[in-house]
Structures are given as structure tokens and as C-alpha cells.
Image: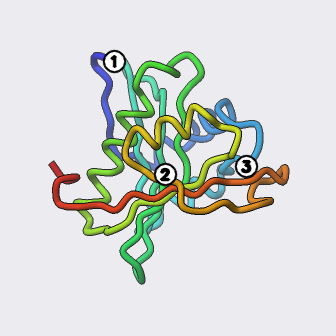
Amino acid sequence: MPHLRIRLAAASDLDSLVELEFSAFKLDRISKRSFRDLLASSAATILVAELKGSMIGSAVLLANARTSVIRLYSIAVAEGARGKGVATKLLEDALRRAAHAGAVRFRLETRFDNLDAQHLFEKAGLKPFDNVDGYYEDGARAIRYERILSNDTVS
């Protein structure tokens, strides 16, 4: 997607992040309060995908200081921008940032019935390693994914 810009979120993005989250997900949404806390947290990195000044995607990364794991907590793309490579660009940027930060593992969870997300993650080299029954608000099972990071991820 030409002219797509990935940048770090700022406090001024709060309302747009919440709007995107609530339009992208029916359940298990990040609340405004949680986004506010994430924006202020040194353990969180929020990426924003912009096209012509409009937010069309976001990704939330969480780092655990005690481990070498960075977790993709959420990735959201506006409905009209889906299928155009926005999630791929966000994920590529997230993987680069995780490797650059010294993480050894990059992990995430996705719903068992979210086949598009599973395809995206597997295409990016993530491998399923666990299932968690009842993970989501509606009781749905999660598939946990992981990718071992290396120096070549940084480039």
C-alpha cells in the first residue's frame, strides 16, 4: 500500500486507537482506560499505521522485563483497509522492533476461528505451539504462536 506510514503512537492518538479497536473487534476490546495506561507504560509499544493522515491500523506490543519475550497483544486494521497489506506491515515492523530490543521470542494469541490472522502469522514465520481453551471472553479457544528471533530479523 503506497504512502502507508508506520509510527509510534502518541497520547494524542488515544481516541483514534479506541475508535479503531471498537470497530475492529466485537469482543475482548482494549478499553480507553487500558489504552491510556498502555500509552504511559514503558513496557508497552503501540504502533500506528496511517494512510493520508488517517489511522487505519494499530499493533500493541508488550515486553516482559524478566524474560526475553515480546508479545503482540493486539493488532487491528480498519475494515476498509483489510486485505491490503496493512497487518503485514505492522507485523513486520513489530518483529523488527522486538529483535532490535533484544527479544529472543515473539509471541501472540489468536482465536481458533480467525483463519486470516493464522495465515498472516504463519506467513511471517510464527509457529503454533499451544492451545488455550476458554481464553476469550466468549469462551473461544486461543492458538498461541511463537517465533524465535535472530539478528537477521533486525534488518
The residue drawn where x is 74% and y is 59% is 135
Quarter of the figure with the N terminus: top left
Q: Earlier in the sequence, mark 2 or mark 1?
A: 1
The residue drawn where x is 60% and y is 62% is 130
Q: Give the residue type at disc 3.
A: Asp
The residue drawn where x is 47% and y is 60% is 107
**Residue situated in front as seen by the camera: 82 or 113:** 113
Q: What's the coloring here? A: rainbow
Residue 8 spot, x, y in % from top left: 35, 46
Q: Which quadrant of the structure image shows residue 85?
A: top left
Q: Give the residue type at disc 1.
A: Met
Q: Looking at the image, do the residues carrying marks 1 and 3 touch, with CB atoms under 8 Å apart?
A: no
Q: Determine which of the numbered discs, if any, sits on residue 28 in the image.
A: 3
What is the crowding at mark 2: few (fewer than 14 residues within 10 Å), some, or many (at least 20)? many
Residue 10 spot, x, y in % from top left: 41, 47
Q: Looking at the image, do the residues carrying marks 2 and 1 touch, with CB atoms under 8 Å apart?
A: no
Residue tagged 1: 1
Secondary element at tag 2: strand
- Distance between mark 2 and mark 3 Cα atoms: 14 Å
**Residue situated in front as seen by the camera: 139 or 129:** 129
Secondary element at tag 1: loop
**Residue situated in front as seen by the camera: 8 or 106:** 106
